Image (tube, rainbow, N blue to C red):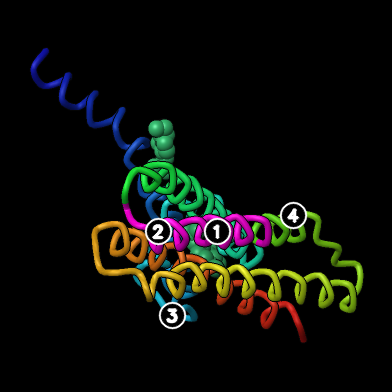
Amino acid sequence: MQSLVLPFLVLLLSVPAVRSANILYAEDSNATDYIRTSCAATLYKDVCYSTLCRYARAIRNDPDRLARVAISVSLSRARRMAEYVSNLSRQADYGAGPRAAAALHDCFTNFGDAVDEIKGSLNQMRGLDTSSQESFRFQMSNVQTWMSAALTDEETCTDGFEDVPEGPVKSDVNNRATGVKQVTSNALALVNSFVNQASP
Ligand SMILES: *[C@@H]1O[C@H](CO)[C@@H](O)[C@H](O)[C@H]1NC(C)=O
Ligand SMILES: *[C@@H]1O[C@H](CO)[C@@H](O)[C@H](O)[C@H]1NC(C)=O
C-alpha cells in the first residue's frame, strides 16, 4: 500500500511545478528568440546574442530596453578596457619601449572618452522624453552621435598601435579592443533599430 501511494503523491505534487517550469521556459525562449531576431540587425550577430541573452527576462521584447541593455554592456566593457590599459601602462613604464608606452597612454585617453560618450548615451536613454516626436528624435540623434563617437575613439586606440612593433602588449590590446568595438558597434545598431521602429 505504502509503496503505491508514495509515487502517486509525488506525481501529484510535481505536476504544477512542471507546468509552471514549462511556462517559464516558454517565456524565456520567447525572450531569447526576440534577442536573436533583433541581433540580425547588427554586424556581430553571435557576439550580440551571447552578450545579451542573459538579460532576456529584463528586456522582455522591448526595443527600448534592448538598446539600453546593449549600451550598458558596452559601457562596462569600455570601462574595464580603460582600467586594463591603465594597468598595462603602469607596467609598461618598466620596459615595453617608448612607442608602446605612448600608444598605451593615448589608448587610455581614447577609452576614457568612449566611456564618457557611452555614459552620456545611457543617461539620455534613461531620461527619454517621448512627449513629442521632435524631442524624441533630438534625444535619439544625440545617442546615435555619441555612440558612433565612442566607436571612433575605440578605433583610434588600435590605430595608435600601427607603428608599435609586434609583441604581446600590442596583440593583447588589439584583441581586447576588438571585442569592445564589436559590442559598441552592436549597441549602435540596436539604437538605430529602436529609432527606426519608434518613428513612423
Ligand atoms: C511571446 O511573444 C508574443 C509577442 O511578442 C506574445 O504574443 C506571446 O504571448 C508570448 N508568449 C509567451 C509564452 O510569453
Ligand atoms: C587592474 O589592476 C588592479 C590592481 O592590480 C586589479 O585589481 C584589477 O583587476 C586590474 N584590472 C583589470 C581590468 O585588469
Q: Nearer the viewer, residue 133 or 112?
A: 112
Q: How far separated are the C-alphas under marks 1 and 3?
A: 21 Å
Tell me the SS state at disc 1: helix
Q: Could you say where residue 161 lies in the image, as x and y percent from the top left?
A: 40, 70
Task: Residue 186: tell me if it is visible.
Answer: no
Q: How far separated are the C-alphas under marks 4 and 3?
A: 25 Å
Assess whether residue 126 is covered by the magenta stretch.
no
Q: Could you say where residue 178 lies in the image, as x and y percent from the top left?
A: 39, 68
Q: Residues within 10 Å of mark 1 (few under 14, many from 20)?
A: many
Q: Which residues are magenta?
A: 96-117
What residue did someone put label 3 on?
43
Q: Residue at x 31, y 48 (%)?
A: 95
Q: Could you say where residue 59 lies in the image, as x and y percent from the top left?
A: 56, 56
Examine the image and state in which quarter residue 139 appears. bottom right
What number is the disc on residue 98?
2
Tell me the mark number nearer the camera, choosing from 2 and 4.
2
Q: Residue at x 70, y 62 (%)?
A: 121
Q: Say whether marks 2 and 4 touch (CB < 8 Å).
A: no
Q: How far separated are the C-alphas under marks 4 and 1?
A: 18 Å
What residue did someone put label 4 on?
123
